[in-house]
Image (cartoon, grey):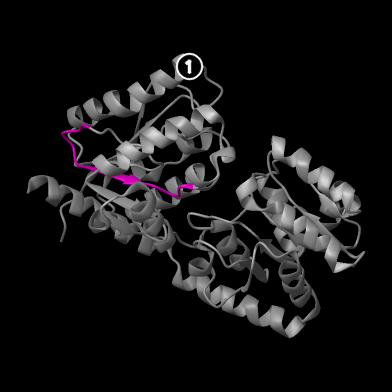
Amino acid sequence: MNDPLHVALNCFFLEPRSGGTGTYTTELINSILALEPETRFTVFATHDLPEEFLATDWNGRVDWEFVPGKVADGGFGSGIEAVASQWALEAWKARRLDADVLHGLAYIVPPISTVPTVVTIHDLIWHHFPGAMTRRDTIAMEFLARVSARSADRVVAISQAAKDDLVETLKVDPAKIDVTLLGSREHERAVPTAEVELRRRFGLSDAKVVLCVAQKRVHKNLAILIDSVGLLGREDVVLVLPGAATAHEQELKALAERIGVGDRVMFPEWVSDEDLEGLFSAASAFVLPSLMEGFGLPVLEAMERGVPVACSNRSSLPEVAGDAALLFDPTDARDVAASIERLLGDQDLAADLVARGHERCLQMSWEHTARETLSSYRRAIAARRR
């Protein structure tokens, strides 16, 4: 039996719209506690922390330590405060609280720490697509993530593609990188909004819904998806792109109008959990055309809900999809359109992909993620002892 660990987590990034990193945090804590219930967590966060995290019991195994700083919308002084909290204050607190390991769940750990450190580098999208973040945030990430990756005792990559990029781009020693794939969510989900209500509110009428859940940023490659809707030549198909508005969204809307599909591409704002479940229930196909993903959780999320999937053949997405999705060239709108047409027009194929998707989700478990992460913690501790 392994001795119980006291794990300190840098969750400075947690705020109401944390997206995939918020999911990663919740599922990792849940799954580690299911595997090793005696684990203790001390979580460092700001007062931007969503209420649901504080409301979760976790059997009393999670303590919260609040540190100064804002996750977003701060000025230069706020940025300095954020670095001081994550690079100095958390290292001191982790030592004082006698933590066994300090894990930065999103890119950042202290470069100098008497406590062994692990950092998860989800992807390097900010490096390859600088427009994905503000210029200030991109410059900060280039520095903070590079230093964290090189100084940490262990680095967690969430796909083999992400590991390969870390080695090639940041020159991280491959021997200290652990590939820890993410998992499928098995717990209860929100009750879906009734489809009739959803179609009325979002103006979907009785069209076939092609759904893509992705941030409206250039690397998500949503323009090619809009182009492919134009190439389909079908009036009975609506593309739905839910999510927070960005500057890039205006370019996407202009493109849809320019090619004559403005009435067939919908841009709902950030939607509730109930509405998102309703969209999955109404969808005839899920399509993700990203040029780069650290992992690609939305692919698994669609498979969990029984929606046939087509996705890009780039980056980590083939690792996630396995044989349970159609893969296409994300730079070729005709290839994307052909994949959508196959999902919509071939019921046998769609049913086969749904069945394969369920099998794929069984293979990709958060239990496995937790087990591999615990191994990474113990490697970091052993390395420091040596």
Residue 121 counted in the magenta span? yes
Q: Give me the residue at 50% from left, 42% from top.
A: 126
**Which quadrant of the structure image shows residue 189?**
bottom right
**What secondary structure predominates along the stretch shown in magenta?**
loop
- Where, quadrant-wise, is the N terminus in this rendering? bottom left
Q: Give me the residue at 69% from left, 51% from top.
A: 276
Quick one: 186 or 359, which is closer to the camera? 359
Q: Give me the residue at 50% from left, 48% from top.
A: 23
Question: Considering only vertical position in the picture, is 262 above or below 131?
Answer: below
Q: Which residues are magenta?
A: 112-124
Q: Give me the residue at 25% from left, 53% from top.
A: 173
Residue 339 location in percent, x, y? Answer: 72, 73
Given the image, on which type of amino acid does mark 1 rest? Phe
Question: Considering only vertical position in the picture, is 350 above or below 129?
Answer: below
Asked if residue 337 can be seen in this view, the reply is yes
Residue 88 location in percent, x, y? Answer: 27, 24
Question: Considering only vertical position in the picture, is 49 above or below 164?
Answer: above
Residue 284 location in percent, x, y? Answer: 76, 68
Residue 188 counted in the magenta span? no
Residue 171 location in percent, x, y? Answer: 31, 49
Residue closest to the far bottom: 348
Quick one: 203 or 219, which is closer to the camera? 219
Q: Secondary structure at mark 1?
A: helix
| Horizontal side of residue 95 vs 316, given as left or right | left
Residue carrying label 1: 76
